[in-house]
Image (cartoon, grey):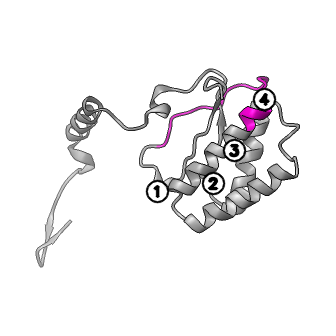
Amino acid sequence: MNDRKLLTALLFGALVAMPLAAQPGGPGFTITASERKETIDGALAKLREAYVFPDVAVKMEKAVRDRLAKGEYDKLTDGQEFAKKLTDDLRAVSKDKHLSIYAMPEGVPEHAVNPTPTAEQRATMRANAARVNFGFEKVERLQGNVGY
């Protein structure tokens, strides 16, 4: 698949600590049948591998594979329409509004391709967190030695 056309961005709340900062691209770019199939296969593989509710991932896969077999995706050649349809079909089963498929004609951002931060990026994130005291505004000890 041409990585410059589609990005399967699976965002599922508690599973992804830092959601991908991907914005949907504009309408009007064409995708091929092989790109549709590869996107579906990739999305379903990621769901099987990492979705927080494995039994729901199995149900989503069955529903999408059934739709694929019926040819429901065959006429979708616009990347945005395809991404929306696939997102809607996955959400119909999962009821998970955090799960999305984005079409990105401008290309896949590097952080989406390699979401694991480098040692340098981790050090920068830690320094930034330390600068704001890791989100703690104050710490108190209540009566009975209860930390608050």
User: Which numbered circle lies on residue 97?
Assistant: 2
| Left or right of residue 10, residue 36 in this image | right
Q: Residues within 10 Å of mark 2 (few under 14, many from 20)?
A: some
- Measured Cα–Cα span from mark 4 to mark 2: 27 Å
User: Where on the picture, by quarter, is residue 39?
Assistant: top right
Q: Is residue 100 visible?
A: no
Q: State the separation of the CA atoms marked 3 and 4.
A: 12 Å
Mark yes or no: residue 57 visible: yes
Residue at the spot of label 3? 40
- Residue topped by disc 4: 32
Sooner in the amino-acid sequence: mark 1 or mark 4: 1
Amino acid type at mark 1? Ala
Q: Identify which residue is drawn at 21% across, 65% down.
A: 148
Q: CA distance from mark 2 to mark 3?
A: 18 Å
**Could you tell me what secondary structure mostly forms the magenta stretch?**
loop
Q: Quadrant of residue 101?
A: top right
Most extreme residue toward the bottom is 144
The earlier-in-sequence mark between 2 and 1 is: 1
Query: Dots 4 and 2: beta carbons under 8 Å?
Result: no
What secondary structure is marked by label 1? Answer: helix
The mark nearer the N terminus, 3 or 1, is 1
Residue 111 at x, y = what percent?
45, 31
